[in-house]
Image (cartoon, grey):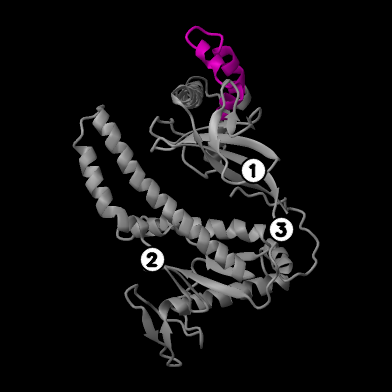
Amino acid sequence: MEVIKGFKYRIYPNKEQEKFLASQFGAVRFVYNHFLANRKEEYLLNKKSLNYYDDAKSLTDLKTKDGYAWLNDINSQSLQYSLRNLEAAYNKFFRKLSKFPKFHSRKSKQCFKIPQHFVIKKDKLYIPKLKAGIKISVHRDLPSKQLCCYISRTPTNKYYVSFLCEVCVEPLTKLKNAEVGIDLGIKSLLITSDGEVIENQNFYRKSEKKLIFQQRKLSKKKKGSNNRRKQRKIVAKVHEKVHNSRLDYIHKITYRLINENQVIIAESLAVKNMIKNHCLAKSIQDVAWGELLRQLEYKASWYGRIFHQIDRFFPSSKTCNNCRFLLESLSLDIREWVCPNCGKLNDRDVNAALNIRDKGLKDLKESMSGLGTKSDVKQKHAEALGKKTKPLKHEAPALRQG
């Protein structure tokens, strides 16, 4: 199966190369903000909406004007891609997928794209407009078919290059009777229908005291001073460690779930709505449910597994898995309950995982029999069981960035 996969490497630019990359970051940000302001002004004055082609033509004219000649020293394709980002932001807004585009800040993530004319030779990365190569640490083999690359800088002043490559991923061996339901939680990261409990490591909570101490020191530094700049970097390092530790942990868990199960079933959670509860928001963000589900989804499509999410309003915790009795209410502090109908003692999380598994398998079975509403589920389930089916007309090749 051909997929698009990301390969990230650390680069070590010298002082002159850091200045060059800073000018690239600044130019890409300037072009985005300049044409966002231009679009807003054009709509207010003339009620006219500009598109990418209007902006690209204006960008060419802008380079010839006084005071903008420095844009000629920047890779033109990187600037054009900044306009593509602006066009995509507008399209998402019109489709009600996001809010209205905002101006980019120097404090936001620094990144620019190089679509072509980049090469690695003898541990050196060569990019357009820069004669000397940038030192790169190639810690793993890079596929030959590279589509584009992104250069980014973190708040801790580390530089990375990410290559998008087209690679062939071989599906895993199909497993029989390997179906699992998972119930996501806060105290425990997830509980499987087999009774396995995967603990929540609470990476942010463990670093919270250290973070509070370092942030207090930062608040006492004079704005614009070198000491404040140094302290800001220390705070950023704490956040970076939390992020990297959490991401590494989730990758290990999702890979094991994909490797050991043929069918994985979970709830579809509205995380953005759930974090509006100020009592649980920090814990929900620390556990990173959204990232875990995202990884399960694309890894399942890569390795020939089936990942299905049931309706978020299904009462998985309040339903007895033994007799299907439904409680009227069940507060969060109750972790075990006795079914009034059959008398079974139910562990809240394990019972929910069993109900999620059964509900998901029922949905898949109905889809296979033609009673379901999601036609792509039928296709995925047949592939997971090793059956041959005709490809659906509306489906396109699954391409994912990892």
**Residue 186, label in figure:** 2
**Residue 309 at least partly seen:** no
Q: In which quadrant is the N terminus drawn?
A: bottom right
Looking at the image, tell me whether mark 1 or mark 3 is earlier in sequence order: 1
Task: Answer with left or right where residue 360 lies relative to residue 278.
Answer: right
Nearest the eye: 395 or 259:
259
Query: Which range is magenta?
Result: 54-82
Which residue is pictured at 65% across the width and 71% down the height? 364
Amino acid beneath label 3: Glu
Q: Label 2 vs label 3: CA separation?
A: 34 Å
Q: Is residue 378 left or right of residue 270?
A: right
Labelled disc at residue 142: 1
> Is the residue marked by circle 2 packed among few (<14), some (14-19), or many (20+) residues within 10 Å?
some
Q: Badge 3 is on which residue?
A: 170
Location of residue 338 in the rendering, given as x and y in whole percent from the top left corner: 39, 88
Residue 90, compared with residue 289, is above or below; it is above
